[in-house]
Amino acid sequence: MAAIQPVILSGGSGTRLWPASRELHPKQFLKLVSDRSVLQDTALRIADRKRFAAPIVMAADEHRFLVAEQLREIGVVDAEIVLEPVARNTAPAIAAAALLAAVRDPGTVLLVLPSDHAIADATAFRAAIAAAAKAARAGHLLSLGIKPRSPHTEFGYIKRGRKLPGLDAYAVARFVEKPNVRSARAMLARGGWLWNGGIFAFTAKRFLEELEKFAPDILAAARAAVEKRARDLEFTRLDADAFAKSPARSVDYAVMERTSAAAVVPADMGWSDLGTWDALWRALPRDKRGNAVSGDALLSDVRDSYVSADGALIAVLGLKDVAVIGTRDAVLVAGRDRAAEVKAVVERLKSAKREEHRSHAEVRRPWGSYRSIDMGGGFQVKRIVVKPGAGLSLQMHHKRAEHWVVVRGRARVTRDGEVFDLETGQSTFIPLGAKHRLENPGAAPLHLIEVQVGDYLGEDDIVRFDDRYGRVQKK
């Protein structure tokens, strides 16, 4: 029997987990429930190549290097990373993946997995997937229905209908989108209702047939984007103009809630969407006072709370049912029952044209990272870390000069055609307008302090002439 084809959806932004989750480093790339990121846990869940083919990972263009790096860290080097040029929700992304999979085998079973969910019971997960795959091969479009534990209002619900003959699956009687508390309680009291876990299984052929029936505009845009795709380094880049023409719709609305072939497999596998700080608190081990704590935190007379400190010490005194999250540049304090409203805070940051919603104080790049450690009128000081064997682009700046000081490791500097090495404690000056490049030829990370001086210090004052990561501006 052919291996199941996983499709990992990694294009989300995770705004409700701000300030840990940011647009450029959203929650799927965070270590929330283990010593690996949530994306890495998802990829390892389907790492058995006897059961699962190499995954297709649908990723936002601006996350491409993060996805590739995190997969390499866990030894997943065979994934096909497909770049979505613009966000168009889940239906267009799944359509593109189905079209790519159908080229190899139209009858292959697609297993669609969000990249940012947690599953505690791997055995139950595998059993549910086996049941879903069997039903998918029989022509059904499957959702995994999660056994509800509370009248949650942030999830969609699925009403289980008749049992399908010879299958461990049920016809879907009804879908309900995010009910209010009263309705959710009534549904749980009546029984037969499941949370919609956002995990799907169907053959590529059946999904594309149903998409053609209910959302032909999405299929047409996805087909054009796939036909005009291009390779870019290790990535598959969908055609931007074609993909942008697709309506932005979820797979639930576009297909699952409309098809007569919808079915559900009940699953009780320790699932969490990790969608809010309250959900994360529930998914984590807690101490005898009901607190889940990470980082440098000091608690006194605190109960049933989530506290995370990434940077400065956080001290919490005399509180109950709160979420306190500190990063290097932002702190959130909220009632745990208000955690779903964090998205509104992010929208206020966007409206104010602040940057804390978009990136962390430490900004990741394919070559390493940088962090601004001081800034004033006409100057900025950064700490730069370059990975072994990595290098920045050959570039120049119109509005700033730079002074580099090596504090650990060895740097190779290109400056207007001159190439030389700097050891720990040595420095150099990059005049305004000079073509320059920084590389790490060593086996250990390079740590460097950069002092920028100029009238304008924005990241968009970069002209790239050559870049191993394909970031040179197209003329």
Image: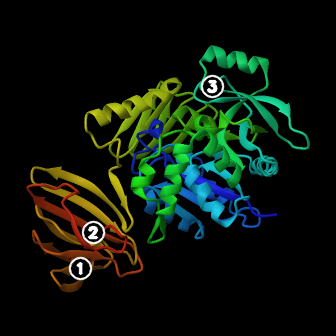
Q: Where residue 200 appears, x then y in whole percent?
A: 68, 45
Answer few, some or many: residues within 10 Å of disc 3's Cα (few below 14, many 20 plus, some between 14 and 19).
Answer: some
Amino acid under label 2? Leu
Image coordinates of residue 122 in percent, x first then y, are 74, 51
In front of the other: 232 or 36? 232
- Residue sitting at x 71%, y 28%: 149
User: At numbered mark 1, what does the secondary structure look like: helix, strand or loop?
Assistant: strand
Indicate the secondary structure of the residue bearing disc 2. strand
Q: Which residue is mark 2?
A: 448
Q: Is residue 122 left or right of residue 177?
A: right
Q: Which residue is mark 3?
A: 152
**Is residue 301 visible in the rendered structure shown here?**
no
Discs 3/1, front = 3
Q: Amino acid at mark 3?
A: His
Residue indicated by mark 1: 413
Closer to the camera, 85 or 70? 85
Q: Quarter holding the N terminus?
A: bottom right
Residue 65's tag is none
